[in-house]
Image (tube, rainbow, N blue to C red):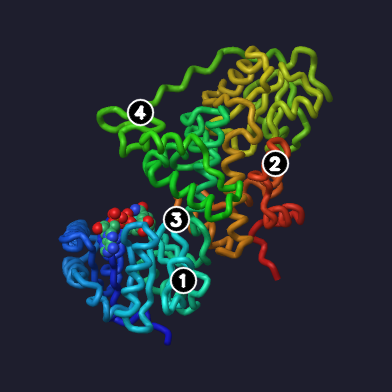
């Protein structure tokens, strides 16, 4: 029987009154539902209720809620103790410790207490919904309802169907999520669900870059903010979340995907986790902090004053050639126009996914004078360049000085297939495509979840459409070729659409 999700007495049980449970109780009560909350720690559920009451009172003082509504919402939250008190619930959401056996035993007990049509949901962030449900008598009424922290501010909820979950259960959870004023997206069970899978593209690729010595974590953060348009760099984000959360989640996703190279974790994260250098919570992570917990960041070095005597831009990559030539004209650069560079010219290449060395070798250019410029993103807030291992510092500094001459900072990284931003964004797109390919979620829902849950400037599909599907494909293909690592192989969903020359969101008939 389908649950009437709009009934005024809809009762939601919340088990676990920690950071997540109290937030779930708050949005459920604000959405007009009756809430029962409990916790195994004596007094914890009461503290959670009092905490939520204060938030409602504050909302009333600020005028975002009437006083009566705040009092009524608080009155809808009832603290209970034993599991038997959840008997009358229409839905029970579990938000206890992240431990498979503890959660399984809780649901095992609960299923004999609640009515047969009561929905059971877990807020787990890393455990399989299918596995959690496997030993239940009625796995079809079990689903994931994954909220984000802090719940009242983060609108996204992932509603996750396990292998045996019935459609009606997910439909009801979607509707209840909306009643809680959330933005639910529907997916099928997968390691890391949706948001945590895509998030690996950002943090893991950044860690691989630093591990390979391409750039410092500070440079990666600067480039991802200024070039990629992300609100926070990947290392800043890991500092905030803590490596004790990020690294185990990465290992879990990698293991659950049977060591899929796309999700391969990195020693940078592992060794810091081992050493207890976790981020803000240990007052030291990738960054050091001052007494007020502001990160101590060295100012950027001044750009060299050097300028090239003449500059030749390789035509091998047409878009990059056009964009860079246009910029160099604005900067008043002494441009050469011949088919080949003159004997003393600074040689600029604009690769997609290739390193400067590959460009120099394959295009027959002098590696001592070759410098690569990233032209995938608009070169407005920051520019990224890299040389080959043989690039003469005189030519590198001349490229740096020229590109910084309008006051735009330049990041000089070491030779790398795909620079910094190309690599990270291509991985985000590739993972997004693999989520679509496996039918875990639709492209529209993937973009929605990523922008809401991760605060990225765009979701993977919007990134690809803005930057060019064929360019993302070219980046991944080149990276796979140069590294020889299947980590970078383009997903088949992406490959097909790139080869057909269509948008990644083109509907299939
Ligand atoms: P927390 O540690 O703040 O709260 C957990 C609460 O559950 C504690 O108050 C604890 O006393 C209680 N508890 C533990 N075992 C219990 C049991 N057997 N019965 C009843 N209560 C029990 O943890 P948090 O952060 O609220 O996480 C809860 C769940 O939500 C975990 O599964 C976590 O993976 C998931 N989650 C956490 C997110 C986060 O950013 N903190 C985000 C999304 C999901």
Circle 2 residue: 480
Which x, y percent locates residue 101? 37, 62
Camera-side mark, 1 or 4: 1
What mark, if any, has residue 452 been given in the picture?
A: 3
Judge the density around disc 3: few (<14), some (14-19), many (≥20) Cα neighbours within 10 Å.
many
**Marks 3 and 4: CB-CB under 8 Å?**
no
What mark, if any, has residue 134 been given in the picture?
A: 1
**Marks 1 and 2: CB-CB under 8 Å?**
no
Which of 164/457 is in front?
164
Q: Left of 302 or right of it: where is 292?
A: left
Circle 4 residue: 288
Judge the density around disc 2: few (<14), some (14-19), many (≥20) Cα neighbours within 10 Å.
some
Camera-side mark, 1 or 2: 1
CA distance for labels 1 and 2: 38 Å
> For residue 279, what is the image quadrant?
top left
CA distance for labels 2 and 3: 31 Å
Q: Which label's residue is closer to the chain start, 2 or 3?
A: 3
Q: Left of 324 or right of it: where is 444?
A: left
Judge the density around disc 1: few (<14), some (14-19), many (≥20) Cα neighbours within 10 Å.
some
Q: Which label's residue is closer to the chain start, 1 or 4?
A: 1
Instruction: Name the residue furthest bottom.
Output: 1
Q: Which label's residue is closer to the chain start, 2 or 4?
A: 4
Identify the residue shown where x is 42% and y is 64%: 183
User: Quarter containing ligand 1?
Assistant: bottom left
Looking at the rendered structure, the secondary structure element under dot 1 is loop
CA distance for labels 3 and 1: 30 Å
What mark, if any, has residue 341 been given in the picture?
A: none
Q: Left of 264 or right of it: where is 143?
A: left
Q: Is residue 60 visible?
A: no
Identify the residue shown where x is 71% and y is 35%: 482
Mark 3 C-beta closer than 8 Å to ligand 1: no
């Amino acid at each position: 029987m389908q649950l009437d999700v709009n009934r005024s007495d809809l009762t939601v049980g919340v088990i676990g009154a920690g950071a997540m449970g109290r937030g779930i109780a708050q949005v459920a009560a604000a959405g007009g539902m009756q809430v029962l909350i409990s916790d195994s720690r004596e007094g914890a559920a009461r503290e959670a209720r009092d905490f939520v009451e204060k938030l409602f009172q504050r909302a009333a003082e600020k005028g975002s809620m009437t006083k009566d509504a705040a009092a009524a919402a608080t009155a809808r939250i009832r603290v209970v103790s034993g599991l038997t008190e959840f008997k009358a619930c229409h839905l029970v959401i579990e938000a206890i410790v992240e431990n498979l056996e503890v959660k399984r035993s809780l649901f095992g007990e609960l299923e004999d207490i609640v009515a047969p049509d009561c929905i059971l949901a877990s807020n787990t962030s890393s455990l399989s919904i299918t596995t959690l449900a496997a030993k239940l008598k009625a796995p079809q009424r079990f689903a994931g309802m994954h909220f984000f922290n802090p719940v009242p501010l983060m609108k996204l909820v992932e509603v996750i169907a396990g292998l045996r979950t019935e459609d009606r259960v997910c439909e009801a959870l979607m509707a209840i999520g909306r009643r809680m004023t959330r933005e639910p997206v529907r997916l099928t069970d997968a390691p890391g669900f949706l948001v945590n899978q895509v998030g690996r593209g950002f943090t893991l690729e950044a860690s691989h870059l630093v591990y390979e010595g391409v750039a410092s974590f500070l440079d990666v953060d600067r480039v991802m903010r200024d070039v990629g348009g992300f609100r926070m760099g990947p290392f800043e984000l890991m500092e905030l979340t803590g490596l004790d959360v990020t690294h185990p989640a990465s290992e879990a996703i990698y293991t659950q995907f049977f060591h899929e190279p796309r999700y391969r974790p990195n020693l940078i994260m592992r060794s810091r986790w081992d050493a207890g250098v976790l981020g803000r919570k240990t007052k030291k992570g990738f960054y050091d902090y001052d007494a007020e917990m502001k990160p101590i960041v060295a100012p950027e070095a001044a750009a060299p004053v050097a300028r090239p005597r003449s500059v030749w831009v390789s035509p091998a990559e047409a878009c990059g050639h056009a964009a860079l030539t246009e910029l160099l004209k604005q900067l008043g650069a002494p441009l050469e126009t011949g088919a080949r560079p003159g004997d003393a010219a600074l040689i600029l290449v604009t690769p997609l996914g290739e390193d400067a060395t590959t460009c120099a070798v394959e295009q027959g250019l002098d590696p001592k004078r070759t410098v690569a410029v990233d032209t995938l993103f608009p070169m407005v807030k920051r520019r990224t360049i890299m040389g080959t291992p043989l690039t003469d510092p005189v030519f590198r500094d001349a490229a740096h000085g020229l590109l910084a001459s309008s006051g735009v900072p330049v990041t000089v990284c070491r030779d790398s297939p795909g620079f910094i931003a190309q690599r990270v964004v291509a991985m985000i797109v590739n993972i997004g495509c693999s989520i679509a390919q496996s039918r875990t979620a639709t492209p529209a829902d993937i973009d929605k979840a990523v922008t809401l849950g991760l605060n990225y400037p765009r979701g993977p599909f919007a990134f690809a459409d803005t930057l060019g599907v064929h360019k993302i494909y070219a980046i991944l293909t080149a990276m796979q070729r140069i590294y020889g690592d299947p980590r970078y192989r383009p997903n088949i969903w992406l490959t097909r659409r790139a080869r057909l020359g269509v948008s990644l969101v083109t509907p299939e008939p």
